[in-house]
Image (cartoon, grey):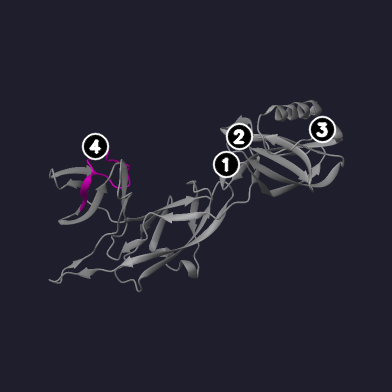
Amino acid sequence: MLHNIRTYAAIALMAIAAQAYSQPNWTINAGDFEFNMNVIGVAYVQCQEATDDGDMIGAFVGNEIRGVQYFDVHSNQRNYAYLFVFSNSFSGDTVHFKFYDASEDTIVDILQYVIFRENQIYGNDATPFIFTAEHDPLQLKLSNNILPRAQQVGNLISTLEVTNGKGIIIDFRSEWINDNYGKDNSLLELNNNKLYLKESLLNHPGDTLKLHLKIETKGQCETDKIITLLLQDITKTEDGQQIFDPDIEIFPNPATDYLMVRSGTTFDQIFIFDPIKLKNHPIKMNKLIDIRDLNNQIYFIRFQKENKYWNRPLIIIRH
């Protein structure tokens, strides 16, 4: 596989020199070295796989550059770097890496390192070497963190969303951490990053639920998050009947062209009510709602469950 490797290395280095990117100024002369090896890999930056042909990986021994390559080989819908690493020692050099992020024009350290060995190959197309850049902490967002105590068992409580250091939503998997920080984990079911009520909360003591989650991403990022859900107590009307005010999230509000509605409560129907034309516009929860046909004015979003209704104001403003 590695016959004529000097020719391949020269071609790779010429290809790098031909690229029109301004940074970084990593250069190497393969003829200055006696031995070489390969690292075939993909990179993850801020827990997201790199897909820019202008991204680069640099190999270093100490502060001396020993290899450089773009992530410009496309295979399996991924961007690979076929990196040649050079040395004048047959084996033993500790090789560390730096990553150039073309979109941000920044250089970041890679967490992994390898030991140089002549003709060694780290990674391949099927199981590439993973270059993982240092990253900012992952952020976890819940679509809802207020839970009516009278919520029905089996209802969707909240949807989890994870963003990286750039604020980009990324794929992840989650699982419970059952310890003192997650003492209420057993009350909820975690399924496809959604929380469902597993047991009735009518007799639950206290005003909060304490949850503890482990989060992992494809980019080998891992963290744990402690979540607090607020319980909304049942209240009573003047005639003594029990009611509750459902948790409802409408965003953005004021709105212009689109909006979304979220709630931990399941309603029989939802619609936007026009108080001027006295018309109802049916809508669906957790879906992007097109409101471009509605005028600039105040509307009401009405939520119906059995014979009960709840109204929330909606303001539409376009300049």
| Residue 316 in picture, x, y percent from top left | 26, 45
Label 3 crowd bin: few (<14), some (14–19), many (20+), radius 10 Å: some
Q: Amino acid at mark 3?
A: Ala
Left-right relation of 113 to 215: right
Q: What residue is shown with label 4?
A: 293
Where does the N terminus fall, quadrant-wise?
top right
Q: Are marks 3 and 2 in contact (CB under 8 Å)?
A: no
Residue 182, compared with residue 173, is above or below; it is below
Q: Comparing marks 3 and 2, which lies closer to the viewer?
A: 3
Q: CA distance from mark 3 to mark 2?
A: 24 Å
The residue segment tinted magenta is: 283-303
Q: Amino acid at mark 4?
A: Asp
Q: Residue furthest front?
A: 319
Q: CA distance from mark 4 to mark 3?
A: 64 Å
Residue at 64% over, 31% down: 72
Q: What residue is shown with label 1?
A: 49
Label 2 crowd bin: few (<14), some (14–19), many (20+), radius 10 Å: many
Q: Residue furthest bottom?
A: 205
Which of pointers 1 and 2 lies earlier in the amino acid sequence?
1
Label 1 crowd bin: few (<14), some (14–19), many (20+), radius 10 Å: some
Q: Secondary structure at mark 3?
A: helix
Q: Is residue 131 magenta?
A: no
Residue 30: numbered disc: 3
Q: Amino acid at mark 2?
A: Asn
Q: Comparing marks 1 and 3, which lies closer to the viewer?
A: 3
Q: Are marks 1 and 2 in contact (CB under 8 Å)?
A: yes
Q: What residue is shown with label 2?
A: 79
Q: Amino acid at mark 1?
A: Glu
| Residue 304 in picture, x, y percent from top left | 19, 53
| Residue 137 in picture, x, y percent from top left | 55, 55
Q: Is residue 296 magenta?
A: yes
Q: CA distance from mark 2 to mark 4?
A: 43 Å
